[in-house]
Every structure is written in C-alpha cells, then in structure tokens.
Amino acid sequence: MNKVITLLIVLLTLAACGGSADETAAQIVRGEQVFSENCLSCHGAEAIGENPAQSHGGQKTDGSYLAPALNGKGHTWHHSNEMLFSTVKDGSVAKDSPMRGFKDKLSDDDIVAVLQYVKSLWPDEIQVRHAYDNLYKRTH
Ligand code: HEC
C-alpha cells in the first residue's frame, strides 16, 4: 500500500512540474508553423531580420521601422518573457510601428509556441543567460 502511495506522490509531483521535453519539442514545431504564417514576411526566414546587416532593426531611409533579427543576433533576448509575450500579443509600444498585436489572430498557446521557436534559434549560451536574467529580473 505504501508503495502505491509513494508512486502516486511521485506521479502527482511530476504532473505538477509540467513542461516535459516532449511538450517543448511540440511547441517548437507548432511555433515554426505560426512563425512562417505570421512573422516571416517581416522578420525573415529563421528570424534573421529584414536586413541581417542591421540585426538590431532601426529605421529605414524613409523613417519606417526595420523588423529586427529575433534569432539571438539582435536585442530581442534582452527582453523579459513578459515583454516578449506582450509585444506579440498587444503589439509594439511604438504606436507607429508595423509590429501590431496578434491577440485577435493567435491564441496565447500559439504566442508561447512562436516564442519557444524563436528561442530555439538562440545559441545555447544566450538561452541560459536569458533564463538567468528572467529569474533574477535583470531584463527589461
Ligand atoms: C508587418 C511586419 C511585421 C510582422 C508581420 C511581425 N513583426 Fe515583429 N516587429 C516588426 C518591426 C518593424 C519591429 C521593430 C519595431 C518595434 O519593435 O516596434 C518588430 C519587433 C518585434 C519584436 C521585438 C524585438 C526586439 O528586438 O525588441 C518581437 C519579439 C517581434 N517583433 C516578434 C514578432 C512575431 C513573433 C511575429 C509573428 C507572430 C511578428 N513579430 C510579426 C515587424 C513585424
């Protein structure tokens, strides 16, 4: 009987921790599809940016905004998870930016999935640094 209870506790603990590696892999696959359909036209294939020579984005000669690289070469990974999520859901804080929110088009799960895909493009050391910065609230 004790063994059954121990097993139950182990299973419940595992379930409560959530987020298995399989779940992450599935999110990345879904996220790549969401990215192709909604983001690639501006941010480029594998999120290299509209102009890879200007991975941080910036402005074009006509004053409009360049879509930055999201792949770890630009500034994106300096933002907190909350900020990344709200940028995709509600749009850029710059009201004249073409980066508008996707809340009418994408579910919260799809927004998380597309961000998981974007993060999967980051080099390992940036993924680790981002997780650390989020944990200690060193992002903005
Ligand atoms: C119509 C073009 C366009 C589309 C489509 C678009 N973006 Fe953007 N995005 C931009 C531009 C331009 C910026 C930079 C200006 C700004 O932040 O307002 C930007 C900024 C961002 C940022 C902040 C990056 C940083 O380094 O600060 C994120 C994150 C982002 N986009 C993710 C996405 C995702 C995910 C999608 C698809 C669901 C998407 N974008 C679709 C044009 C676009």
Image: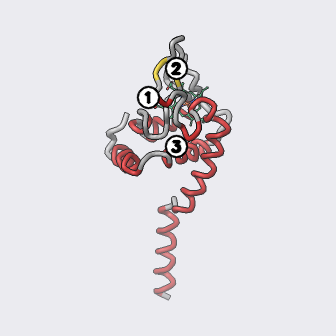
N-term mark: 3 or 2: 2
Does any atom of ligand 1 lie closer than 8 Å to the CB of label 1? yes
The residue that appears at 46% across and 35% down in the rendered structure is 83
Residue 58 x, y percent position in the rendering: 46, 21
Which of the two marks, 1 or 3, is nearer to us in this view? Answer: 1
Q: Which residue is denoted by mark 2 in the rendering?
A: 65
Badge count: 3
Instruction: Find the distance from the CA under tag 3 to the CA under tag 2.
Output: 20 Å
The residue that appears at 36% across and 37% down in the rendered structure is 139
Does any atom of ligand 1 lie closer than 8 Å to the CB of label 3? yes
Give the answer, above or below, for where 55 lies relative to 1.
above
Residue 54 x, y percent position in the rendering: 45, 26
Give the answer, above or below, for where 58 lies relative to 129.
above
> Residue flagged by tag 2: what amino acid is it?
Tyr
Per the image, label 1 sits on a secondary structure element best described as loop
Q: Which residue is denoted by mark 3 in the rendering?
A: 118
Q: How crowded is mark 2: few (under 14 residues within 10 Å), some or many (20 or more)?
A: some
> Residue flagged by tag 3: what amino acid is it?
Val
Proximity of marks 3 and 2: CB atoms separated by less than 8 Å = no
Q: Which residue is denoted by mark 1 in the rendering?
A: 56
Q: Is residue 30 left or right of residue 130?
A: right
Does any atom of ligand 1 lie closer than 8 Å to the CB of label 2? yes
Residue 138 x, y percent position in the rendering: 32, 39
N-term mark: 1 or 3: 1
